[in-house]
Image: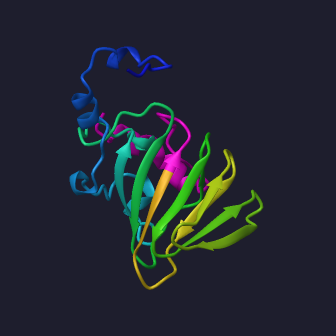
Amino acid sequence: MHVARHPRPPELADVPLEDIRERYVGRFRDKKPDWQAFEDAKIEGFKRAQHRFIGGGGSGKHGDQSVIPPRGFTLSIMYVEPGQGNAAHTHEVEEVFFVLRGFLDVFLEDEQGKQAWTRLGPWECIACPPGVIHGYTNASLEPVYFQVMLGRARPEAMGYADEQLYARREAHLANSPA
């Protein structure tokens, strides 16, 4: 006989293991790419698809039953074609990019516009600290798949460094299904 040394959360206290397994396993085949997850994804050069695994991310989109409920972080897989990326932005929490397949060019930026770039390949990652402007592009000839994690179960929407994109952020959140 084994003893659980930590209690289950109240909502799982009497839930059978088979039910927990079904709710807490995410399969890529069940994911639908969300090409509208971000305000900047509507703009050429920033088009990408998000496949949510844990949590709804900062986009405010919830209700997809294939998404595992978040506790302390979110996890998604991003698909980005060559020539696409995302706009410079910040988060109130750490964001991690972990490349699974392909190459991703990532930048950190200061408020004067100085950028520090690096190329990540398969099984490489970067942790972007809170408040540090960052972003990425796929400058390669092949699509890239990478994991994105945010350090909070329900993070705020990204804070675009560009004033026009930032101004459109609230409208994007208002149009997101809750």
Work out whether residue 65 or residue 109 is closer to the camera in this orientation and state it: 65
Q: Residue at x 45, y 30 (%)?
A: 71
Where does the image place residue 59, in percent across and percent down from the top left? 41, 43
Where does the image place residue 36, in percent across and percent down from the top left? 33, 55
Q: Decide: is 65 above or below 103.
A: above
Describe the colour scheme in one phrase. rainbow
Q: Decide: is 46 above or below 111.
A: below
Q: Is residue 171 visible?
A: no
Residue most extreme to the front: 1
In this rendering, position of residue 106 left or right of residue 78: right
Q: Quadrant of the N terminus?
A: top left
Where does the image place residue 74, in percent across and percent down from the top left? 46, 42
The boundaries of the magenta stretch are: 149-178
Q: Quadrant of residue 117?
A: bottom right
Based on the picture, tell me whether residue 168 belongs to the magenta stretch: yes
In this rendering, position of residue 27 left or right of residue 138: left
Q: Quadrant of the C terminus?
A: top left
Q: Quadrant of residue 92?
A: top right
Work out whether residue 138 or residue 102 is closer to the camera in this orientation and state it: 102
Q: Residue at x 46, y 63 (%)?
A: 146
